[in-house]
Amino acid sequence: MGKKVLMQGNEACVMGAIAAGMRFFAGYPITPSTEIAEISAQELPKVGGRFLQMEDEISGAAAAIGASVAGVKAMTATSGPGFSLKQEHIGYAAEAEIPVVVVDVQRVGPSTGLPTSPAQGDLMQARWGTHGDHPAIVISPATVKETYLEAIRCFNLAEKYRTPVIFLMDEMVGHLREGIEIPEADEIEVIDRTVNKNLTDEQAYSIPEGKYAPEMAPFGEGLHYNISGLFHDETGFPRGTAQSYEKFMNRLLDKVEKNRDDIEKWEEKFMDDAEIAVVSFGGAARSAEEAVIEARKQGIKAGLFRPITVWPFPEKALEAVAKKVKRFLVVENNAGQMVIEVKAHAGNVPVDFLGRFNGSVVDPDEVLAKLKEEA
Amino acid sequence: MRNREELRLVGSGGQGVILASVILAEAAILAGKNAAQSQSYGPEARGGACMAQAVISNGELGFPKVRIPSFLMALTDQSLEKYGKNLPEDCVILVDSSLEIPEWLAGRKYYQAPILQAAIDQVGKAQTANIVAVAVINKLLDIVPQDVLKEAVSARIPKGTEAANFKALEVGFNLL
């Protein structure tokens, strides 16, 4: 580990991305994600990378996808209104199987909303924002250090499964500065896409035995192959049958479904003898954790269950918790989104909800009061 | 310094209270303490009440935002009005000398310092008021040694502004 430095969440996102190999960023500044663009512009040229400010949010996503096809690890970043605009291209990247990282530093919405204030109202949009069935990997960090480390994991998963990964930050963490020790290069794992120069144009999207994602043919190095948002077969062209379309869609979804063990990540604290499990993620989880610690001091057996990979939701892990606890309390900075998922997997265990969507982070005192009420 | 300080610095957007809180948090980290910094502001580019905060701890940091302020500094009447409520008994309060002292504050102990005026008269640059403030706060709360504070200031100011900002530190150290 390096020396401890004071770093902002948005800065940690960029520095983690660069450590993971990001060498291209395209975007359009929007609060509270603007520092990600600014710091990318500052830092990428130092490592031989490129920063491109585009004319709008949509082209920011498009340029990042294009750079990735050309062989460079790429990212774009935005907040609510821009995240809505990028949805079409997120679907395109999922369908055309292009690794890319899309950061959404959430603010209060809908529309322009409260641009400078924290919220977590994009959780469902991150899963279902683009149309049609599609695989979704969405990661949400709670600390500055975790932002650095999980930015790396976003790139690793995008590269490994050839799919867009959404880094769902929020203003609370994006604009928070904390002390962080930057890991040395040999302390982190970096995964690169598999590139195969020997593919023929009949094999551009063929799947190696035992894998879920095709190898990547180097673009612009001789092989002419088709990249399309249409359902495609292994040639990349849309000339299949109903049967092959279903096979294709199942394979896309299986990238996530069959690899949940590799993709899911969550944290449990004070859960061994907990009677009330507080479920929370991202910035709100900081308040939830503080409340759990205070509740414990007051003799309330509370614990914290915090999804880090929020999609796919860690269903099995939550079901295991449901077998042990008497109640769930879901704490979010929105009007109730993750609570839907918790209810779906809580069995007969009652699920309560505490949400704040007034521009402030949910307060630890509010969570504590709710825990006392329930104990 | 007390074992844990929860600092709230408030003023008008553009006065630099966010940078002041960043410098204090950075100085604490340089001195081997734990610290976190954050802020709250509206969509205005300038003006409006702006609140910056820093949590500094000799031990584990825990929750990174201010819950119960142990210190408040206000540089404008508007921000004192907005963020000065419900302060605990032992909260150290510092207000700029230009502020009108509201009724709730008149009855309790507080510090007054001519931070804004000193930046103009003694440093010669109104923009250095936040650095004057950083020095006053460090003197009041004894967060880090002066040389560490200077190091943190160096790290966060634009190149070429060192002379004015170091002068501001010196002015601040001698203001109370």
Image: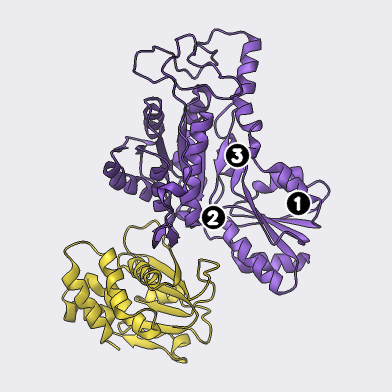
Label 3 SS: helix
Disc 2 marks which residue?
A: A142
Q: What distance separates the C-alpha of mark 3 from that of mark 2?
A: 17 Å
Residue drawn 39% across and 49% down?
A15
CA neighbours of label 3 inside 10 A, class few (<14), some (14 to 19), many (20+): many
Query: Label 1 is found on which chain of the structure?
Result: A
CA neighbours of label 1 inside 10 A, class few (<14), some (14 to 19), many (20+): many
Label 2 SS: loop
Residue B153's quadrant in the figure? bottom left
Mark positioned earlier in the residue sequence (1 or 3): 3
Disc 3 marks which residue?
A: A263
Q: Amino acid at mark 1?
A: Val
**Disc ID at residue A321:** 1
Q: Amino acid at mark 3?
A: Ile
Seen in the picture, residue A157 relative to A43 is either above or below; the reply is above
Where's the C terminus of chain A, which quadrant? bottom right
| The chain in purple | A
> Do residues under tags 3 and 2 come within 8 Å of each other at their CB atoms?
no
Residue B142: image location, x then y, percent: 38, 83
| The chain in yellow | B
